[in-house]
Amino acid sequence: MKQNKQIKNWWIDALMFVGYLFCFYLEFTGVIGHEWLGVGIGILAIMHTWLHWDWVVLVTRRFFSCAGARSRWYYLVDILILIGFVVILETGLVISTWLNLDLLNYVTWLDIHLYASYATLALLVLKVGIHWHWVINITGRIFGTQKRPASIGGLTPLPVPDRVDKGVVDRRRFIGLMGVVGVGSLLAVINVVRENSIFTDTGNSNVSAMDVTETMSAGQSTIVEPATPPATDAAEKAAVTSESDTTTPMIETTATAQPTMVPTQADVAACQVRCPKGCSFPGRCRRYEDQNSNGLCDLGECL
């Protein structure tokens, strides 16, 4: 019975950790899938707490009296993970498609959501490292990697002790487990940083992800008038001046060139888009819209 409970705990923790890593790959899950995956992880976290509720109550009562140092250390790590999950769920709900709030400080909420995710992931990796021995033992039981002595004719052979350094074996197992967990977590963080690096670009500090003020009107560009070459000959200038003084000014109607809609470098520099992520397909951003049907989000274009 106790072994079945341990296996159940292992599956809940494994699904929660793997699902949490998948939350860092928004291009795979999409915004809607990301939100529902977060809800599922929250449910698994509640189940994990419920299965360990007796231990939580016991350590809470004895934390300042007779609780051991190891129990206090485990308890503090779990409390920090719980706080991290609460912050992630609350900020995620604020910026979710379910509420669809028009936030002027959207980037601030997003940054809190991301930093809380990073910190919680680091705490989860630390928790795996703390309980690495339990993780490896239960994994061996589930997938049958632990060797069991075979019985012959009703007799169970006794294991022959080998001269194997248990410390070396444990170090190898620990390094293998933490290597897999650490590399997976690092790749997830790198993916999120790469996707959101545009928001921390210092080259254009006045660009925000969800700017409610549209700085460029539709179809606006710089009107370039035909340039008139300046007169460089001083004598020619004097002749024109004297002629204008002695004769009656004539109003001549000359054909002027039509203004050419040519964007200049200054125009491009002054262009400020409302969202610089440049999404080319729906599902990655809850505010995606494409009214001109060019395959690009209108919030990321200079209209």
Image (cartoon, grey):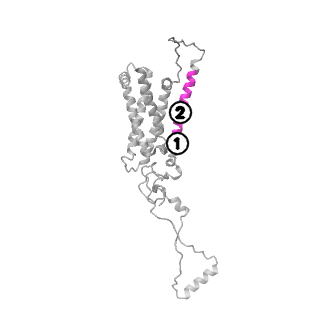
Question: Which contiguous range is marked in magenta?
Answer: 169-189
Tell me: residue 151, above or below residue 291: above
The local crowd at label 1, few if under 14, some if 14 to 19, many if 20 or more residues have their Cα within 10 Å, is some
Tell me: residue 300, above or below residue 231: above
Q: Secondary structure at mark 1?
A: helix
Q: Position of residue 22 (x, y in %)?
A: 47, 39
Amino acid at dot 2: Gly
* Residue 136 shows in this picture: no
**Which residue, as the protein is rendered here, is positioned at the far bottom?**
247
Residue under the image location 61 percent in, 84 percent down: 239
Q: Is residue 15 left or right of residue 236?
A: left
Q: Position of residue 23 (x, y in %)?
A: 46, 40
Looking at the figure, which quarter contains the N terminus?
top left
Which residue carries the number 1 mark?
191
Amino acid at dot 1: Asn
Tell me: residue 173, above or below residue 33: above
Magenta region, main secondary structure: helix
Tell me: residue 238, above or below residue 28: below
Q: Position of residue 46 (x, y in %)?
A: 37, 32
Residue under the image location 55 percent in, 85 percent down: 244
Nearer to me, 40 or 194: 40
Q: Is residue 238 covered in magenta?
A: no
Residue under the image location 57 percent in, 18 percent down: 166
On residue 182, the disc is 2
